[in-house]
Image: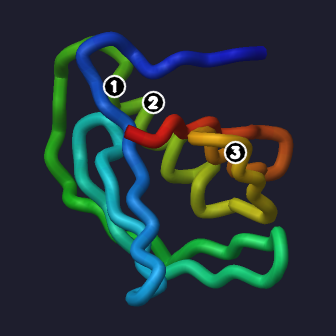
Amino acid sequence: ERTYVIEGTDITATFEAGAKRVTGRAGCNSYSGGYKLSGRRLTLGPLASTEMFCPDPPGVMEQEQRYLKALSGATTYTIEGRTLKVTCGDTTLVFEAK
């Protein structure tokens, strides 16, 4: 099942190679945490996020919880052109480079 980001929200991930940190927006709140790479294996966390409540658009808080849970369970990644795919159990997160 393919799920898209709710219109009016942004989900981002910036991987800082030197610091081995990931930062981004999870729809409402910002988050950050460490990451480790080993070949195609990716381990993230622990992740910390701000704790604002966003009532709009509807569903944004549930989307954020699903996203952060999936991202915390990352196991592998692939890069194809400008697309990063992060496998998190039975979920694949797809990011497009800006």
Determine which residue is flagged by label 1.
60
Query: Dot 2: what SS?
Result: helix
Marks 1 and 3, how far apart in space? 22 Å
x and y percent of residue 82 in the render? 57, 41
- Dots 1 and 2: beta carbons under 8 Å? yes
Q: Amino acid at mark 1?
A: Val
x and y percent of residue 60 in the render? 33, 25
- Quarter of the image with the C terminus in it: top left
- Dots 3 and 2: beta carbons under 8 Å? no
From this view, report whether residue 40 is shown above or below residue 94.
below
Q: Amino acid at mark 3?
A: Lys
Q: Nearer the viewer, residue 76 or 55?
A: 76
From this view, report whether residue 54 is shown above or below residue 47.
above
Determine the residue positioned at 78% across, 83% down.
38
- Which of the marked residues, 3 or 2, is nearer the chain's N terminus? 2
Q: How is the image coloured?
A: rainbow
Determine which residue is flagged by label 2.
63
x and y percent of residue 55 in the render? 18, 22
Q: Amino acid at mark 2?
A: Gln
Dot 1, how many residues are within 10 Å of its Cα: few (below 14), some (14-19), or many (20+)? Answer: many
Q: Residue furthest front?
A: 81
Marks 1 and 2, how far apart in space? 5 Å
Determine the residue positioned at 31% across, 31% down.
10
